[in-house]
Image (cartoon, grey):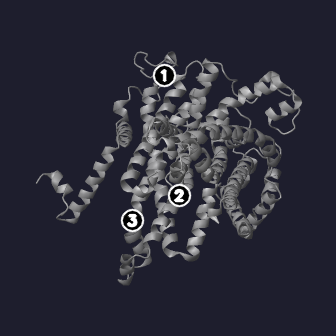
Amino acid sequence: MSWRAALLSDTPRSRQEAKLGALYRGWLRFRRNRLAVLGLLIVVALVVVAAFAPWIATHDPYAQNLAQRLLPPGSAGHWLGTDEFGRDIFSRLVYGARITLYIVVLVALIAAPIGLLVGTAAGYLGGWVDAALMRLTDVFLAFPSLILALAFVAALGPGIENAVIAIALTSWPPYARIARAETLTIRNSDYIAAARLQGAGTGRILVRHVMPLCVSSLTVRVTLDMAGIILTAAGLGFLGLGAQPPMAEWGAMVSSGRRYILDQWWVATIPGLAIFVVSLAFNLLGDGLRDVLDPRQKT
Amino acid sequence: MAATFRQLPGFALQLALTLLGLLAVTFFIGRVVPIDPVLAVVGDQAPRDVYEAVRRELGLDQPLWVQFGIYVRNVLAGEFGMSLVTGRPVVEDIARVFPATLELATFATIIGVALGVPMGIAGAVWQDRWPDQIVRVVGLVGYSVPIFWLGIVGLLVFYGILGWVQGPGRLGVFFEDIVPTVTGVILVDAAIAGEWEVFWNAFGHVVLPSAVLGYFSVAYIARMTRSFMLEQLSQEYVVAARAKGMSEARVVWVHALRNIAVQLVTVIALSYARLLEGAVLTETVFAWPGLGRYLTTALLAADMNAVLGATIVVGAVFVGVNLLSDLLYRLLDPRAR
């Protein structure tokens, strides 16, 4: 029996095999969506570029060379041109991938667990805990996220870590909503009752029996939100409140290139294009994942 | 109708609770997060006596809940404190800059409705054909493109290269202070004064930023219209109307559209509120003297009173619009009662 037949067989021989089989079927369905695959490829490329930045970059991203400032794309040695300090734009883009990835991953790692915890606790415990936690969620949802993130950054001070904290603090409420909705549908199911009768405590039930079931819809939502997180982070960088110079953050690069836009269009345009491509990729990937993992939400 | 009015006290309570929560968040940001809230308000250049006065005024010698009480009372009385940057009360500043933002958001919404609704309907009527693909692409780009970048590229192309529009700002230097301020919205003021040259100059300035901002509303409104319309077109009354021999245009534009009208109004209201957020970045790009630019200028100067004042205003508008559209929905749509 080939590995493919084994994966697709209706009678898996072990739990592992069943899991792998389900995963493989998901992949087959995902693969049919060409745009989603394109999104995945771009995201993988982003990760590779970020990981191997020193080998991919042609120049030191911080090395200034005022003799070669504002060179147009296609110049010898600088195929995307140079910025106002003569720094190689391509190399800065490559290193900027690290910052973008750093922000996105960190925000997801902070915000998703907060949302998961708040949502499952509210849904499972019900009563006044539910009411209180959901009111809190509503209040955070009441602000447009960029505005709230701005206010947090104003209090914490500019910087990349503070930008991450601010974005995370503003992006958990939707996750809490989703986790709560999922919890409500499973809290009265028999297997939860069985776990409870076996003497499992609330914490154990939440962590072992409720949270795992919320993960797939949360994954979809987080992936779809990645684009929004990238845009917010870039917006903060553009306003000078995110990563500080001379860090090669894409939003900050757009901001500093803005002054030269009419004569040297590439300085501001190219980093913005990078932001656009990456967030487009996350949107495509998220749409594809949604169709595979959560057919109910299909629009 | 009567049932809706009976729900009004509940709505009012919900509104009050949410607004209180809003204040709790801004209070938390202003007082708890900074290491020294007084420094955050007066800046590190302030003389000793100013520092002490502000410290007493904020009630920092009191327990936290008393401070919160003072804070809520101040905000309700319309006192957001003084701005470090302008040296004027924050409330006055906001009242002065808000019309500019309103002007931008209104134009953007008009663009969003004028293009978004027909596009969404076309997408639903020709599902999976080319008009639908266009709606999909417009939506996808709208959710992926950094708005500040779109603004910069727009300036480059339409101002720098083609010269079709005016540059950043709200009015050319030569046209400033010609028309008296009545509403604060220059287009309206110019029309009232009959200064058509000023009017057209102001129009040239507002077109590009509102188009950039409006693009996001087009993406959102088209997407929502499409899914509402798809839902209606699969209903039996549509089949009945078609079976009767009614023209397709009449089925779509009269029968189906009337059924999604209320949902659309809600979506449009929400997108209007969401534009306030996009306005922060757009105004920075176009040097548009509105609330968003006020907020970012204050941010860079660490002017906490102004930042929190602007945040509260945006949050309150957001909450208000949300609740209003909810209420409107119940009032206009019998199915939601």
Query: What residue lies at 62% left-to-right and 63% top-to-bottom?
Result: B336
Q: Element under label 3?
A: helix
Residue B3 lies in quadrant: bottom right
Assess disc 1: are there few (<14), some (14-19) or many (≥20) residues with their C-alpha within 10 Å of its C-alpha. Answer: many
Q: Is any atom of residue B137 visible in this view?
A: yes
C-beta proximity under 8 Å, tags 2 and 1? no
The dot on residue A174 is 2
Q: Chain of mark 3?
A: A
Marked residue nearer the N-terminal end (3 or 2) = 2
Residue B87 in percent (x, y) is at: 82, 43
The reply to whether residue B85 is visible in this rendering is: no
Q: Nearer the viewer, mark 3 or mark 1?
A: 3
Query: Mark 3 — residue?
Result: A213
Camera-nearest residue between A260 and A194? A194
Q: Could you say whether the residue bearing mark 2 is in a helix, strand or loop?
A: helix
Q: Chain of mark 1?
A: A
- The amino acid marked with disc number 3 is Leu
**Three-letter amino acid code of the residue under disc 1:** Thr
Instruction: State the image coordinates of residue A245 (x, y, percent, origin top left).
Output: 55, 35
